[in-house]
Image: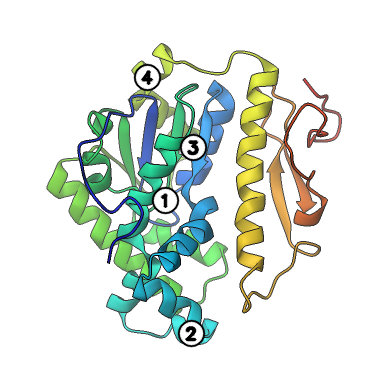
């Protein structure tokens, strides 16, 4: 079955991409989001493209993607472990992510994070492993974070997530990839600083967004990706949600380098496109547009 991005012809390098991989609940999103806001980078969140990637797989006739959509929510999480991994499109999505990144502007730097970003995927990009790290949480840390998400013991999601831990750890060892082992004892800022040290040379060389306006546009890009993620999910006939009642924590678009504030908004209340100068920014209380 051929999928978008499934072939491996020689490809140009992506020197402007910083890669963060790791299993679910490793803290990838939190770390990448903070680094992007602090340094003026474009944040590519693989989770925000989940349903877009599924639609691409369905259009290509991928049987596991088609089966996932056909099953009820209860049925799809009760299948055998091997089928859970197949229906997650873990291996196929990694190559789609590379295609997505090639379609983005080369400036400023992109920090890309997601579970499907594996050492095998990054190894297909010339020079890619030079700016890459895999976050490896302890079993206790992952269990605690998954409990915080409300996943009950024995849930199919837990089975999938734990299976992905083993797959990713095996690849990290096989490729000799850089890893950062986490036990949950430290603060998030410690992990951020550790990843910043790994990426220090690339962050110093840039390019990065220099002005508040440039940073605000990058924040809008990330916020818009989240809206698209929800909309693609709501389009499923089996989806239980809708844009009026579902709320997301959007990044404040003031563009200040020290801003870490988010604003909870219903998806339906996020400004409609186009994302041009006339579109009102999403701002935390007391913050001003750049």
- Up-down relation of residue 260 to residue 167 (above or below): above
Q: CA distance from mark 2 to mark 1?
A: 28 Å
Whole-percent x, y for residue 218 in the image: 61, 30
Please identify, in this view, whether the residue under mark 2 or under mark 1 is nearer the observer: 2
The residue beneath circle 4 is 202
Please rate how many residues cluster around mark 4, counting C-alpha atoms within 10 Å: few if below 14, some from 14 to 19, many from 20.
some
Compare residues 208 and 37 and report the one nearer the observer: 208
SS under mark 3: helix
Q: CA distance from mark 1 to mark 4?
A: 23 Å
Apparent side of residue 171 relative to residue 279 in the rendered image (left or right): left
Q: Residue at x 36, y 43 (%)?
A: 98
- Up-down relation of residue 90 to residue 127 (above or below): below
Whole-percent x, y for residue 275 in the image: 72, 35
SS under mark 1: loop
The residue beneath circle 3 is 32
Please identify, in this view, whether the residue under mark 1 or under mark 4 is nearer the observer: 4
Q: Looking at the image, is mark 1 or mark 4 earlier in the sequence?
A: 1
Compare residues 131 and 187 and report the one nearer the observer: 131
The residue beneath circle 2 is 71
Please rate how many residues cluster around mark 3, counting C-alpha atoms within 10 Å: few if below 14, some from 14 to 19, many from 20.
many
The residue beneath circle 1 is 26
Q: Residue at x 78, y 47 (%)?
A: 270
Please rate how many residues cluster around mark 2, counting C-alpha atoms within 10 Å: few if below 14, some from 14 to 19, many from 20.
few
Compare residues 45 and 149 and report the one nearer the observer: 45
Q: In the rendered image, which quarter contains the C terminus?
A: top right
Q: Looking at the image, is mark 1 or mark 3 earlier in the sequence?
A: 1
Q: Are marks 1 and 3 in contact (CB under 8 Å)?
A: no
Res. 137 visible in picture: no
Q: Looking at the image, is mark 2 or mark 1 earlier in the sequence?
A: 1
Q: Are marks 2 and 1 in contact (CB under 8 Å)?
A: no
């Amino acid at each position: 079955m051929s999928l978008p991005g499934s072939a491996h012809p020689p490809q140009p390098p992506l020197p402007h991409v910083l890669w963060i991989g790791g299993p679910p609940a490793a803290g990838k999103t939190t770390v990448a989001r903070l680094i992007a806001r602090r340094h003026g980078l474009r944040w590519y969140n693989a989770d925000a493209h989940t349903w877009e990637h599924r639609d691409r797989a369905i259009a290509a006739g991928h049987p596991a993607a088609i089966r996932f959509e056909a099953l009820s929510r209860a049925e799809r999480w009760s299948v055998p472990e091997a089928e859970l991994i197949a229906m997650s499109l873990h291996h196929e999505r990694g190559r789609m992510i590379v295609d997505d990144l090639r379609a983005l502007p080369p400036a400023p730097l992109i920090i890309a994070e997601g579970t499907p970003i594996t050492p095998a995927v990054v190894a297909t990009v010339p020079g890619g492993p030079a700016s890459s790290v895999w976050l490896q949480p302890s079993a206790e840390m992952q269990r605690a974070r998954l409990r915080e998400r409300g996943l009950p013991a024995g849930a199919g999601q837990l089975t999938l997530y734990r299976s992905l831990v083993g797959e990713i750890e095996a690849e990290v060892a096989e490729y000799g990839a850089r890893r950062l082992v986490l036990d949950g004892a430290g603060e998030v800022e410690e992990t951020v600083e550790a990843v910043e040290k790994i990426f220090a040379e690339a962050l110093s060389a840039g390019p990065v967004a220099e002005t508040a306006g440039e940073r605000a546009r990058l924040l809008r890009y990330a916020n818009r990706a989240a809206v698209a993620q929800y909309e693609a999910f709501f389009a499923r006939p089996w989806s239980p949600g809708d844009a009026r009642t579902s709320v997301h924590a959007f990044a404040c678009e003031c563009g200040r380098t020290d801003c870490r504030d988010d604003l909870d908004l219903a998806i339906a209340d996020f400004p409609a496109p186009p994302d041009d100068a006339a579109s009102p920014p999403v701002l935390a209380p007391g913050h001003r547009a750049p």
